[in-house]
Structure formats: structure tokens, C-alpha cells
Amino acid sequence: MKARVTVTLKTGVLDPQGKAIEGALKSLGIDGVGAVRQGKIFDIELAGADKAAAEAALKTACEKLLANTVIENYRVEIGA
């Protein structure tokens, strides 16, 4: 089974990397860029077919390793 974990900064947390990307896009002449926020995506392959167990395991992984829950949110999506 495949899963995707998306980690993003919480609203209100400063994002200097996003600001740098925003500035670079504007300097490249990309018009219409209002704001950029960056994040992380983890594509994970899991053994087994129990979606509930996989989701629980990935939430634990996020809480302990993949996300800094003080400043980041995460979303777990389980595929087939």
C-alpha cells in the first residue's frame, strides 16, 4: 500500500524559504505570484493491507519524526 504524508508550516509561522522562493520567482519574471509557502512531501510504501493500522503508524511517525508539530501541520493520505 502507498501513502503520502504532507507537512506544511502552520498559519502564522514565518517561512523564510517560501519568501526566498517568492522573490526568485518574481525576479524570473513570473507574474501574479502573491505568496509562497513551502513544505515537505513523503511518499511511503507500506507492507500489509490494513489502512487503519497504516494511518495510525504514519501519524505516530509524524508526531515523532516527520513533522515538528509545534510549528507544522501534517496530513496522511492512504492509497491502494
Image: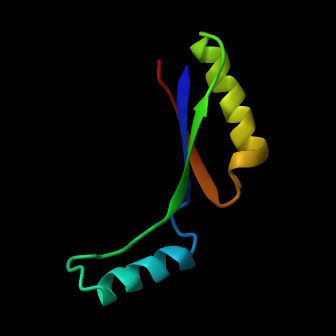
Q: Is residue 22 left or right of residue 52?
A: left
Q: How is the image coloured?
A: rainbow
Residue at 67% over, 31% down: 58
Question: Is 31 rendered above or below residue 11?
Answer: below
On screen, residue 18 above or below 52: below
Residue at 58 percent of width and 15 percent of height: 51
Q: Residue furthest top?
A: 49
The N terminus: image quadrant: top right
Location of residue 61 by image quarter: top right
Percent x, y of residue 75: 53, 40
Residue located farthest toward the bottom when viewing the structure as drawn: 27
Q: Position of residue 14 (x, y in %)?
A: 56, 75
Residue closest to the eye, 29 or 74: 29
Asked where in the image residue 28 lies, by quadrant, the reply is bottom left
Vertical placement of 29 versus 54: above or below? below
The image shows residue 7, relative to residue 44, as above or below, that is: below
Residue beneath the point at 68% across and 24% down? 56
Q: Nearer the viewer, residue 13 or 21?
A: 21
Give me the residue at 40% from left, 71% from top: 36
For the image, the number of numbered tags is 0
Horizontal relation, residue 52 to residue 69: left or right: left
Q: Residue 71: image x %, image y %?
A: 65, 61
Q: From this viewpoint, which residue is outermost toward the right?
A: 64
Of 12 and 38, which appears nearest the observer?
A: 38
Could you tell me residue 68's position as x and y percent? 71, 55
